[in-house]
Amino acid sequence: MVYSYTEKKRIRKDFGKRPQVLDVPYLLSIQLDSFQKFIEQDPEGQYGPGSCFPFRIPDSELQR
């Protein structure tokens, strides 16, 4: 079947009425949990800024 140009424009697919397949996670809580895990003092040293920077700047260097 051959459609004219105006008939082609009217053929549309509507995906707005499909059922929700997946629940959207609360993305802010994921980011906040990750930040908390990074900031907390971990005794094993696996996480946190101390694991990224194993050296410590002496206090005398900070006074300059």
Image: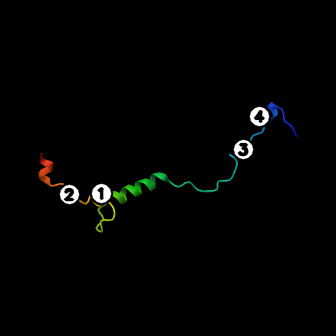
Q: Nearer the viewer, residue 10 or 16?
A: 10
Contact between marks 1 and 4 (CB within 8 A): the answer is no
Residue 38 location in percent, x, y?
35, 58
In this rendering, which labeled residue sits more in front, label 2 or label 4?
2
Alpha-carbon distance for marks 1 and 2? 11 Å
The CA span between labels 4 and 3 is 14 Å
* Nearest the eye: 2 or 31: 2
Residue 56 has which mark? 2
Q: Quadrant of residue 51?
A: bottom left
Amino acid identity at mark 1: Pro
Q: Which residue is mark 4?
A: 9
Percent position of residue 60, x then y: 11, 52
Q: Is residue 13 left or right of residue 45?
A: right
Residue under label 1, please give it: 49
Q: Determine whether 47 is above or below 2 in the image.
A: below
Question: Element type at marker 2?
Answer: loop
Q: Is residue 8 above or below residue 50?
A: above
Quadrant holding the C terminus = top left
Mark 2 neighbour density, 10 Å: few (under 14) some (14–19) many (20 or more) = few
Q: Amino acid at mark 3?
A: Asp
Q: Residues within 10 Å of mark 4 (few under 14, many from 20)?
A: few
In the rendered image, the residue lying farthest to the bottom is 44
Labelled pair 1, 2 in contact (Cβ < 8 Å): no
At 36% from the left and 60% from the top, the residue drawn is 37
Q: Name the amino acid, label 2.
A: Arg
Q: Quadrant of residue 56?
A: bottom left
First along the sequence among labels 2 and 4: 4
Spot occupied by residue 62 in the image (x, y as percentages of width and height): 15, 49
According to the picture, the residue beneath numbered tag 3 turns out to be 14
